[in-house]
Structures are given as structure tokens and as C-alpha cells.
Image (cartoon, grey):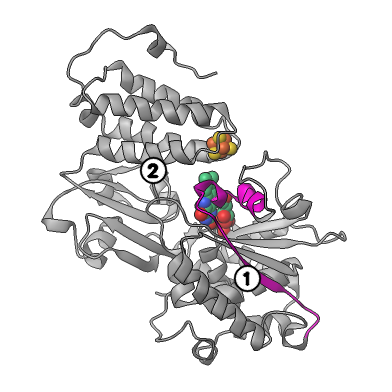
Amino acid sequence: MKIILKDIKDLHKIDVYESNGGYSALQKALKEMKPEDVTNEVKSSNLRGRGGACFPTGLKWTFMPKTGDKPKYLCCNGDESEPGSFKDREIFEKNPHQFIEGVLLACYAMGINAAYVYIRGEYYTWINILQTAIDDAYKKGYIGKNILGTKFSTDIYIHRGAGAYICGEESALMNSIEGKRGYPRVKPPFPAAYGLWGCPTTINNIETLANIPEIIKNGAEWFSKIGAPKHPGTLLFGVSGHINKPGVYELPTGTPLMTIINDICGGVLGGKEIKMVIPGGSSMPPLTRDECLKANMDNESLKEFGSSIGTAGVMVMNEDTDILKVLIRIAKFYYHESCGQCTPCREGTGWLLRVLKRIDAGNGRMSDLDLLTSVAQNIEGNTICALGDAAAWPVKWTVKKFRKDFVNKIKDDVEVPVMNKVHSLR
Ligand SMILES: Cc1cc2nc3c(=O)[nH]c(=O)nc-3n(C[C@H](O)[C@H](O)[C@H](O)COP(=O)(O)O)c2cc1C
Ligand code: SF4
């Protein structure tokens, strides 16, 4: 089942997109549906955001004010900087017009006249592809003033990121578009009340928006019956690591993880056993081999193992993997990307990294395992944005699930200095 990455040659070209039913959902909405009908259809479809948090999309759209004279904005989040996530660029490359049509439908539903597409700056090739698609859609009257002869007008602008992971967080993204430092904002106020330039704003992921045209074309009921009932539709799984055929695969939500690994991706590299799989980008808690055998890839199912679907970036690691080295790499990333506003995140990410490194260097103590958990727990839930959680979860859960790997690196249990007995950062 393919909703976005359809096997149609040259689908990125506007003529090919049109001849395959492209922009018919926009025509249908503008001619036959009121803006609130579009929102209701998305709400009934049960579509949940594909940017990591799985928030119900239709519900989010209802938060936008229906009255008031301030302009409203849509921010389309294509920052895609989480390690292991590389699925949005596939949409820009293979089906940019379906994303653009989704943007237009979202703007129509929420009464928005300007949308910003925030794209990871390194995605140079994909920025060019999307810009060409936007230019072509302007020429054909799908974007701009009085779209398809109606009163509805919307412009779409591309904004290039400059290499900061934190700018994918929705409020940092808005600050970045405003030309400010990419600092996350304290919430509330939420973006629907006070967003871009203080105006009502909705932020959605690229994949989320790319689903909208098919929902409007085929109906909410059709969509809600695909995949896992509580998290319906398809997901663009970006599979990487020790796997024979890495890549982006669109599959229904709830597909068993082992089907993805063995049937779709040709099995683990070198015929080895799995040691660990991170199911949804580097911030998601990992799965052990036994959990992989039981896991279905949708958000509700993964909760059973203390994990989540995140961005569906599946990272497969075989039996030879040094878990500690992997965790150090991940911890280093979050330490580096912390914007530094909150003490638990700014200081805690550094603590995590230092303690992990000393265990790896053979200078660890058994009490370090509790210390790691304690530091992670003191970051979690105590920060302005979710980068803190993203840094804490992999450490907390990897220590819990792969304790033996850590214990094996700890040679002697030496006396613990007083500083390490402090179990709170506050
Ligand atoms: C540190 C951090 C980085 C994020 N990066 C992205 C990103 O690159 N792309 C994205 O869509 N969402 C990202 N998010 C989530 C966004 O804040 C937001 O929830 C999402 O764009 C909403 O879209 P959705 O409801 O369609 O999923 C990030 C969140 C955090 C905390
Ligand atoms: S949690 Fe980290 S990244 Fe987020 S605002 Fe605080 S310091 Fe910045």
C-alpha cells in the first residue's frame, strides 16, 4: 500500500502528477468543501503527525482561531536532522507536488495565506527540486492569488536551515524563520495562539502534509482503515545500519519489525543476529533482540516496550555492535546540539557524555550506572523543549535494557568520589 511514494515514473514533474490525479483533491476542496469540512475530514481520518510526537493532525488544526485580523501561518517542518531520519527528502525528490497540494489544503482549511517550508540546509539538491515544483505550481495557478479562480490565495516560501538540529523543534523553527537565534520558546503560549511573528501558526511535518491530498480524495474512512487502527496510514520507514538493503520504504503502520528487516530489507548484514534496533530516530528508546521479534511498528504497539515510533528511522545493529560506543555517539550529538538555555539539558548532556566515556575507557564504577539513570531522569521533563527528553531517553533505556554490556566494561568497583553520589542536578 503506497500513499506517498507511488511507483510512477517522473511523478515529480507537474504534468505527470496532474495526469495521475494530482491537484484533484485541491479542486474538490475548493469547489465542494468548506474549510471546516477539510479539517473535519482530516480529524476523522485519525492521521497523526509524522514529525515524531504523533499528535493528531486534525485536532491540531482546530486550535487555530477562526476569527481575528492577524495573519495566520503554516510552517512545514523539513528540518529532518535527527540521526537516522531521512524520509522527508524522499518526498521532496519523488512526489513534491503531493506535499505542495497538502500544504494548499491545510492553508485552505485553516484560512492561511502564507506557508513556509523549513528545509535542512544541507538538502541542497532537494531544495532545488522543491523550488522547481513550487515554481511550476505557481505557473499553473495552483499557488498564488485567486487559486483556480476562487477567492483563496496562498503563497509558499522555502526557508533554508543552517545546520542546527534544534531548529527542527517547532518554536525554535519559528524563531529561526524570524531571523532570531534558534532558541525554543517556553510554552504556553502555543503556536496556534502566538506563533510566527506573534501570529496564529500551525507547524506540521512534510510527511504529515503529504498524506492530506489522498485523505481528501479517498475519504477519512478509507485512510483510517489502513494499518494500525490507533495510528492509521502508512509510514516512510528509513532503514539504516547493519542491513542488506537500507533505504526508505513506505509500509502500513503496524507492520512487524522483522518483516521490515527480513522481507523488505533482505535481512541483517552478513547473516548475523540482531543485537539492538532503534525504531524511530536516535532519540527513541532501543529494542532488544527479543523485543524486535515481537514489535509491530506503530506508536501504540511500541509503547509496550517503552519506546515510540518517532520519525520511523529504523537503525539496525548486529551482534558485534559495541553498545557503549553507539550510546557515546548519540550522547555526543545531543550534547553538541543542546542550545544551552536550560541547565538540566546544557549541563546534564555533558555529564552523560563524560560518564559514558569514562566507562568506555575502563575507568567506570558500578555506581555510574545509577548515576547515568539519575542524570537522565533529572533532565527528563525538566526542560523548555523535548531535546532534553531526546537526550535522556536513549541513555536511560539503553542502560536498563543492555546493562550487561555496561557491566562488562567496568573492571573493578572502585570507591565512588563524593561528587558522584549527588543524584540530583537541581
Ligand atoms: C529537538 C527537536 C527536533 C525536532 N526536529 C524535527 C524535524 O526535523 N522535523 C519535524 O517534523 N519535527 C521535528 N520535531 C518535532 C516538532 O517540534 C513538531 O512536533 C513537528 O514538526 C509537528 O509536526 P507533526 O504534528 O506533523 O508531526 C523536533 C522536535 C524537537 C524537540
Ligand atoms: S531542552 Fe536543551 S535544547 Fe531545549 S531549550 Fe533547553 S537547553 Fe535548549
Q: Quadrant of the C terminus?
A: top right
Q: Residue at x 61, y 46 (%)?
A: 182
- Location of mark 1 (residue): 103
Q: Is residue 219 visible?
A: no
- Classify 19 as above or below 291: below
Who is closer to the viewer here, 378 or 342? Answer: 342
Q: Secondary structure at mark 2?
A: loop
Q: Above or below — where is 225 with respect to 396?
A: below
Question: Is residue 168 within the magenta segment?
Answer: yes
Write the start and end of the magenta stretch as one range: 150-176
The reply to whether the residue tagged 1 has its Cβ within 8 angstroms of ligand 1 is no
Please state if 171 lies on the left or on the right of 407 as rendered. Answer: right
Choose the circle earlier in sequence order: 1 or 2: 1
Residue 415 x %, y %? 27, 7
Q: Amino acid at mark 1?
A: Val
Image location of residue 123, percent across then percent down: 46, 64
Is residue 8 toward the left or the right of residue 38 in the image? left
Residue drawn where x is 61% and y is 36% of the image:
384
Q: Secondary structure at mark 1?
A: helix
Q: Residue at x 72, y 52 (%)?
A: 195
- Read off the residue under disc 2: 304
Quarter of the image where one finds residue 136 = bottom right
Q: Position of residue 326 (x, y in %)?
A: 29, 41
101 relative position to 423: left or right? right
Picture residue at 59% right of the left edge, 75% below the top = 100
Image height of 321 relative to 242, above or below: above
Q: Residue furthest right?
A: 69
Percent x, y for residue 54? 52, 53
